[in-house]
């Protein structure tokens, strides 16, 4: 089983749509969780951290379910500029370990 | 000002050559990383340095050797390049909150170096 699994998509949605991405992780000792965004041929950039209580940043809402080892990202009112690959990332927060990236989910928003 | 910079941005070379990629960060971070993103877009850690000390050394061929002259720089030297080394290599940095390299705050990535081995 892969450490971090995501549906690769692509998700093709019209502007204004609501879209949700899911991610599962295999190591129950994982401590920190993030969503990164990567535009085509660019570097990944942090979109938001994911907290146990869930958190929202504008049109973006992230949820964490530790019992099911499941992370989600909801994007409301999609914009053309949201088109990118969204990477689910987990961290054990232990010395000698590093961020573990999922392969990403590709979103394409069209007008 | 670019926070994490890499040079070169593109690198095209023949099999068997030796090449280096340079990385510099001006964020004052303690920890720097090298990642490889292959053709399937999978991003995987290769190395991590904390205050010039090697923290993470994943299973990569020993043809890859990182060098950190100071905590603002982490260079990657690759010997005897092979076709399978073709990928995008990203440098990144983060502030180490524990002093042991164990906690990674937000990682800031460089723009990537697209390596093509012919």
Image (tube, rainbow, N blue to C red):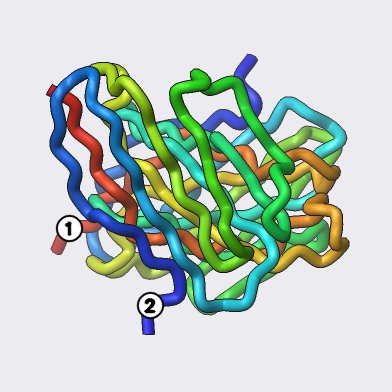
Q: Residue at x 66, y 50 (%)?
A: B49
User: Is residue A52 left or right of A47 when viewed as pictured?
Assistant: right
Q: Which residue is mark 1?
A: A110
Q: Nearer the viewer, residue B77 or B60?
A: B77
Q: Residues within 10 Å of mark 1 (few under 14, many from 20)?
A: some
Q: Residues within 10 Å of mark 2 (few under 14, many from 20)?
A: few
Q: Residue at x 52, y 21 (%)?
A: B62
Q: Residue at x 27, y 68 (%)?
A: A81
Quadrant into which the C terminus of chain B falls: top left
Q: Which residue is mark 2?
A: B2
Give residue A15's quadrant in the image. Answer: bottom left
Q: Find residue B56 and name its label.
A: none
- How far across and down, in percent of the image, does residue A61 sit? 59, 64
- Identify the chain of the residue marked 2, using the numbered disc in the image: B
State whether residue B70 is above or below residue A102.
below
User: Is residue B112 left or right of A41 when viewed as pictured?
Assistant: right
Furthest-bottom residue in this view: B1
């Amino acid at each position: 089983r892969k450490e971090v699994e995501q549906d690769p998509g692509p998700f093709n949605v019209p502007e204004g749509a609501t879209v949700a991405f899911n991610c599962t992780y295999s190591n129950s000792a994982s401590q920190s969780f993030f969503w990164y965004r990567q535009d085509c041929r660019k570097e990944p950039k942090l979109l938001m951290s994911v907290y146990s209580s869930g958190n929202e940043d504008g049109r973006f809402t992230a949820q964490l379910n530790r019992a099911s080892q499941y992370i989600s990202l909801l994007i409301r009112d999609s914009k053309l500029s949201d088109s990118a690959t969204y990477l689910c990332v987990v961290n054990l927060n232990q010395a000698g370990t590093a961020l573990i990236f999922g392969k990403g989910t590709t979103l394409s928003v069209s007008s | 000002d670019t926070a994490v910079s890499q040079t070169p941005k593109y690198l095209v070379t023949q099999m068997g050559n030796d090449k280096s990629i340079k990385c510099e960060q001006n964020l004052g971070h303690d920890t720097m990383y090298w990642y490889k993103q292959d053709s399937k877009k999978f991003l995987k850690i290769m190395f991590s340095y904390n205050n010039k000390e090697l923290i993470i050394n994943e299973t990569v061929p020993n043809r890859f050797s990182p060098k950190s002259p100071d905590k603002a720089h982490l260079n990657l030297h690759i010997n005897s390049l092979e076709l399978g080394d073709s990928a995008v290599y990203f440098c990144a940095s983060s502030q180490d909150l524990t002093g042991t390299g164990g906690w990674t705050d937000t990682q800031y990535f460089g723009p990537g170096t697209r390596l093509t081995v012919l």
